[in-house]
Image (spheres, rainbow, N blue to C red):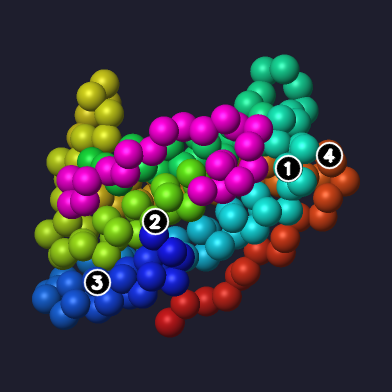
Amino acid sequence: MERRTTLAALVAGFAANSATFTNPFAQAFLKSFVDHWKDTREYTLAVLDAMPADKFTSKANPAQRTFGEQLLHIASANTAYFRGFTLVPPPDMKTPDASDKVAVRAFVAAGFDFVESVLARMTEKDVLRTDIKFSPRLPAHSAVDIFLRAYMHTAHHRGQIITYLRVSEITPPTWKFEPHA
């Protein structure tokens, strides 16, 4: 799905669903998360775009994932987190070769598209859930926990790949740090 279409659907879905919210926390939290998720998508893709295609196999030491593998990990994990809401069927995403910049970018964008499609369908009840299973080996989580895990996990691994840019003598893109109303 094209990014503008996805973002428009996300905004429209949020607007339609938020009209039925009676819990101010749930409504404010979802709105804030949606706004920040758009920023994290843009920044993650900007970091990906900053790395030349021939450096997607770079890594600082043998124990680490490559630049491309880190990005695939981010997208796969976010899909797993939000699949637990069962609001939208997960995409049929075959993991591409981590050295293929174009394929990695498409995979990462598809992961963000999926999360945004789930967010667009969220109701107050979904935001307040405490029974989400994203892994059979882990206990159920709250929706807020899933939101925070996805956001922090993305930031954690994106921070690692920013280091990969620096090691390659590439100045990373600037983080957009603006408040959301």
Spatial CA span between label 2 and label 4? 30 Å
- Identify the residue position indicated by label 2 in the image: 113
What secondary structure is found at the residue carrying circle 3? Answer: helix
Residue 91 relative to residue 181: left or right: left
- Identify the residue position indicated by label 1 in the image: 53
For badge 2, the amino acid type reads Asp
Residue 55, by quadrant, is top right
Task: Determine which of the numbered discs, if any, sits on residue 167 in the image.
Answer: 4
- Identify the residue position indicated by label 3 in the image: 13
For badge 3, the amino acid type reads Gly
Q: Assess disc 1: are there few (<14), some (14-19) or many (≥20) residues with their C-alpha within 10 Å of its C-alpha.
A: some
Task: Determine which of the numbered discs, if any, sits on residue 161 in the image.
Answer: none
Up-down: is 115 above or below 153? below
- Sequence order check: which comes first, mark 3 or mark 2? 3
Spatial CA span between label 3 and label 1? 35 Å
Instruction: Please provide percent x and percent y for residue 180.
Output: 47, 77
What secondary structure is found at the residue carrying circle 2? Answer: helix
Report if residue 50 lies within the magenta region: no
Q: Are marks 1 and 2 in contact (CB under 8 Å)?
A: no
Residues in magenta?
86-106
Residue beneath the point at 50% across and 40% down: 74
- Sequence order check: which comes first, mark 3 or mark 1? 3
Report if residue 97 lies within the magenta region: yes
Up-down: is 22 above or below 108? below
What secondary structure is found at the residue carrying circle 1? Answer: helix
For the question of whether residue 55 can be seen, the reply is yes
What secondary structure is found at the residue carrying circle 4? Answer: helix
